[in-house]
Image: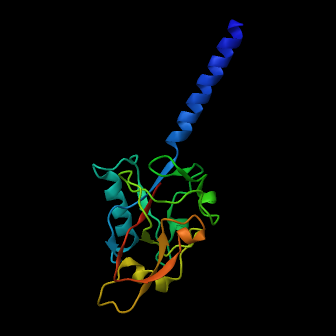
């Protein structure tokens, strides 16, 4: 009887260690607290905004490298992101996708609606210009590669939305570049 107890305890301990190790590999996703003009200095500037919010003293997200779910007509999450084999989760642990393939198969499991401090948001639009498969929308809807200024002339972008799980989460509406919107940030 004692041997069975030892075996069961050992199995339970090994399972707990395996679950704990898997949790460290999850990739956190959040919506920025701040809204930004479309002239973010390109994709690198948008990534820097995600990183600044992740590193902020009020942030509850794990340390690491964060990049914006954003495309410029050439580069996109499909070409820029590390494609994780592990789950993507919100700051509260809610899973949005099992891995990068699941993230980019069209629908996500839960809406992306929590900021880096853990605050749940209502319906918010975010800069995207990214198809739900992670590829770039057409270049004419990327606010001139996220460098648009009021003297650049007429330009549009595509927005995602925080209250959808269908393909619309990433590419919901077309919008002029003169407004401000949030970003969605993914840990790499």
Residue in view at x 60 percent, y 67 percent: 166
Relative depth, front residue between 119 and 148? 119
On screen, residue 97 above or below 106: above
Q: How is the image coloured?
A: rainbow
Residue in view at x 43 percent, y 71 percent: 125
Q: How many marks?
A: 0
As drawn, the residue found furthest toward the front would be: 122
On the picture, is 1 further left or further right than 29? right
Quadrant in the rendering for residue 1: top right
On the picture, is 49 further left or further right than 21? left
As drawn, the residue found furthest toward the top would be: 2
On screen, residue 20 above or below 29: above
Relative depth, front residue between 144 and 62? 62
The image shows residue 176 at horizontal and vertical percentages of: 40, 85
Residue in view at x 52 percent, y 44 percent: 25
The image shows residue 30 at horizontal and vertical percentages of: 43, 57
The image shows residue 118 at horizontal and vertical percentages of: 39, 51
On screen, residue 13 above or below 98: above
The image shows residue 51 at horizontal and vertical percentages of: 35, 57
Quadrant in the rendering for residue 46: bottom left
């Amino acid at each position: 009887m004692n041997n069975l107890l030892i075996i069961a305890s050992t199995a339970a301990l090994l399972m707990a260690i395996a679950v704990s190790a898997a949790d460290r590999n999850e990739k956190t996703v959040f919506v920025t607290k701040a809204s930004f003009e479309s002239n973010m200095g390109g994709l690198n500037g948008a990534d820097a905004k995600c990183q600044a919010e992740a590193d902020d003293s009020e942030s509850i997200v794990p340390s690491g490298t964060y990049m914006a779910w954003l495309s410029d007509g050439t580069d996109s999450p499909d070409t820029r992101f590390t494609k994780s084999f592990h789950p993507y989760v919100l700051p509260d642990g809610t899973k949005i996708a099992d891995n990068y393939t699941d993230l980019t198969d069209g629908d996500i499991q839960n809406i992306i609606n929590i900021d880096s401090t853990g605050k749940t948001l209502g319906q918010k639009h975010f800069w995207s210009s990214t198809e739900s498969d992670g590829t770039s929308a057409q270049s004419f809807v990327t606010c001139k590669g996220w460098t648009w200024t009021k003297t650049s002339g007429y330009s549009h972008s595509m927005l995602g939305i925080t209250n959808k799980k269908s393909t619309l989460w990433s590419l919901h509406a077309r919008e002029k570049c003169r407004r401000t919107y949030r970003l969605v940030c993914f840990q790499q």
